[in-house]
Amino acid sequence: MITFTTDFGTRDWFVGTMKGVVLGINPQARIVDITHEISCGDISAGAFALAASCHFFPNGSIHVAVVDPGVGSTRKGIAVKTRNYVFVGPDNGVLSLAIGKHEIEAIHSLENEAYFLKPVSTTFHGRDIFSPVAAHLSRGVQLKKFGPQKSNFVELKWSAPRRLKNGISGEVLYIDKFGNSITNIRGEILGRSPNRVCQVLGKKVIRCPLVDFYQTVPLGKPAAIMSSSGFLEIAVNGGSAEKQLGLKLGIRVVVLSSHT
C-alpha cells in the first residue's frame, strides 16, 4: 500500500500523474490519498497531517509526503524505514513528526537515478523521484539500492506545551477544513481532571469549557475538546472556530482549573 500526502490539490493533473507513475511500475499497488489539500508550501501542516494518520495503515505501508517548496534546490530526498513503515519525501521536515513516533531502522538519501524517471524535472520531484521510488519499494527493492545511508534527517522545531502553576499552556498548530484549531496539547498531558476551562489568548481573551463532544455546548458557542488526532482542539458547535474566533496558527491556548 502506498499513501500520498501533498499540497497539490486535485484541480490539476499532478496527483493523477503520480499515481500513473506508480501503477506503471507496479500495477498491483494499492494507492490511498491521505490528503492533497495542505496549504501550499506549508511543511508543518503536511507533517502534522501525515503524523496524525500514518499509524492507522497496515504494517509495511509506504507513506509518500510531498510538500516541497525547495524542489530543485540542494535539499535531498530521503527514504526512512521504521519498524512498521517506510516514509519517502523531501528531507525538509515534512516527514519528521511522523518518523519521530516510530522506531527508525535506516535512513537513505535518494541518489540512484536508475530508479527515477528520466529526465528529472526541477519542479516535480513528486512525479520523477518520490513516486517511482515508492513503486520500486513496493515491488521489494531494498532501501540501500536507492542511495547511501544517512544518520539523521531534518526535523521541524515543534513548540512544546508548558506546565503552569494553574494549568498547561500551548498553541494552535493546525487548522482543519471545519475551522477546528488543533493545539500541541496532547490528551495524556491533560489527563482526566474535571472542572477545567480553556482560555484562548488571541486579539481578545476567549474562555470556553473543556467538553467531551461538540454539542455539549449550545449552537454557535466555542468549546475545547480532545480531537481524534489526540490533541486538544478549539471548536465552535456548528461553526468555524477559525472564522468566528479569529484563530490563527501560533495563538496561545491555556487550560486552567475552573476556579482560576
Image: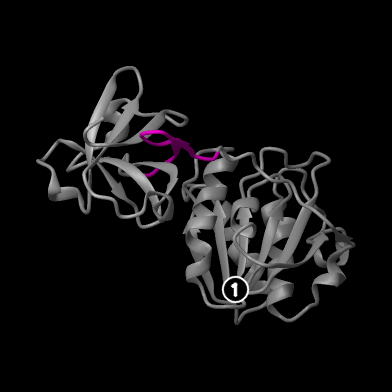
The total of numbered circles placed on residues is 1
Image location (x, y in percent) of residue 96:
65, 52
Mark 1 surroundings: few (<14), some (14-19) or many (≥20) residues within 10 A:
many
Q: Is residue 233 left or right of residue 212?
A: right
Residue numbers of the magenta segment? 160-176
Camera-nearest residue between 250 and 50:
250
The residue under the point 80% across, 71% down is 143
Q: Is residue 125 visible?
A: yes
Please give the name of the residue rendered at 43% of the width and 45% of the height, measured from the top-left corner. Answer: 185
Q: Nearer the viewer, residue 16 or 200?
A: 200
Q: Is residue 7 visible?
A: no
Q: Main secondary structure of the magenta part?
A: strand
Along the line of sight, the residue nearer the viewer: 112 or 242: 242
Kind of residue sitting beneath label 1:
Ser
SS of the residue at dot 1?
loop
**Residue at 66% from the left image edge and 78% from the top image edge:** 26
Q: Which residue is mark 1?
A: 61
Q: How is the image coloured?
A: one colour
